[in-house]
Structure formats: C-alpha cells, structure tokens
Amino acid sequence: MLETDSLTIRFGGHAAVDGVTCAFQPGTLTSIVGPNGAGKTTYFNLISGQLPATSGKVRLHGQDITGLAAPRRSRLGLGRAFQLTNLFPNLTALENVRLAVQVRRGNSLDLLSRLRGHRELIDQAHEHLTAVSLADRAETVAATLPHGDQRKLEVGVLMALNPQVYLFDEPTAGMSIDEVPVILNLIRRLKQDPSKVILLVEHKMDVV
C-alpha cells in the first residue's frame, strides 16, 4: 500500500534520512524506533509531504506521490498525527472532530451556519469523541484542554478522517501514565482492520 524507494533528504551536507527503502502492507503495524535525532520524524515528514525529498520516491498504491503537497496526500489516504498537537485551537473539541467528519464526507466547509443543522455529522463526531474518552469535553475549546486531552483529540480527528495509512508520531508524548492506555487501546483497535497500514514512530520501547 505504501512504499518509500531510496528516500533521502539532505540539509546542507548532512543526510537526515539516507536512502530509506521500505514497503508497508495492509493489515500491518510497523514501529520505527530510535533515539531522539535519529531522523524518525523527518522520515514521516517526507512520507506525509511536510518536507520535500532531496531524492527518492514515495508511492501510495503504486502511484508516485513524491511531488504532491501534504493536503493532496491526505486526500489520497495518508493520515498524520503529529509529535506536537495539530488542532484548530479556537474551536471546541466537537468542532474539531466534526470538521474532520465533514471533510471525509466531502461536504463544504461552512463552519458557523450549515454545520449546526447536520445532526448526522454531529452524532458521528460524538462517537469519535467517546472513543477517545473525551465525550465530557465536547464543548471545551481545544486550546484550553490539558496536553494529554489534546493528544487524544488529535487521534479522534485522525480517526474521523478514516485514512488508509495512519502515521502516529510519538502519540503518547507528554501524556500522563494513566492516559497512555487510551491511545494504545485505540491503536490496537485500528490494528484489527486488515485494510489499514499503521506506522508508529517511537523511542519508548514499553510503548512499542
């Protein structure tokens, strides 16, 4: 489903990712491990389109997507959870997830008027919030959520987008020990779907 072929990026004379060739099959979870600074997140940035490759290829379902921008790759089925949270900070938890549901369905992005009447979208958003244990925080503005809840919300947004490839970049970073099982159980649940690819960047081996 997803391949990188001799994928490389150089910053000046330094190769941060050097000729990585991998193939990832549906129904698998692959952990990319290593210490801080090893290039794990940079590799994810190349796959998801946040950084342009110096050389090499990224393919999704055999299609060369190396030259595509990140939003286009997302629409083709690449979903990314960042090491640092990537949310709409001034929207509520429900609005963040509801937007993702709406984008997935291909509806127009009229935030303040049309969305209020879309009960089905709201119900689906509530289901995703429940899955990440945030049902009681639905009306809380994302920026005011504790860091651990922001991480859970980002996973909820990613689940609402329903990508074919899930890219989790240290999904438990900054979370308390009692919050970590929520994220790990969500990833376990996603792993049961034989049509999905899951990539996990991590340096904590107990999480892996």
Image (cartoon, helix red, strand yellow):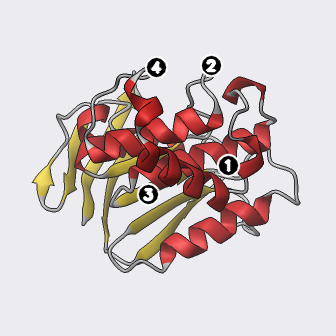
Nearer mark to the viewer, of 4 and 1: 4
Could you say where residue 111 lies in the image, as x and y percent from the top left?
Answer: 43, 23
Separation of marks 1 and 2 at Cα, in angstroms: 17 Å
Of pointers 1 and 3, the one earlier in the residue sequence: 1
Q: Residue at x 37, y 46 (%)?
A: 18
- Which numbered marker is on residue 152? 1
Separation of marks 4 and 1 at Cα, in angstroms: 24 Å
Asked if the residues shown at circle 1 and circle 2 are in contact, with their CB atoms under 8 angstroms apart, the answer is no
Separation of marks 3 and 4 at Cα, in angstroms: 29 Å
Q: Residue at x 72, y 67 (%)?
A: 205
Separation of marks 4 and 2 at Cα, in angstroms: 13 Å
Secondary structure found at label 1 = helix
Asked if the residues shown at circle 1 and circle 3 are in contact, with their CB atoms under 8 angstroms apart, the answer is no
Secondary structure found at label 4 = loop
Q: Residue at x 63, y 44 (%)?
A: 153
Location of the N terminus (image quadrant): bottom left
Q: Which residue is mark 2?
A: 90
Of pointers 3 and 4, the one earlier in the residue sequence: 4
Nearer mark to the viewer, of 3 and 4: 4
Nearer mark to the viewer, of 1 and 2: 2
- Which numbered marker is on residue 166? 3
Asked if the residues shown at circle 4 and circle 2 are in contact, with their CB atoms under 8 angstroms apart, the answer is no
Q: Identity of the amino acid at label 3?
A: Tyr
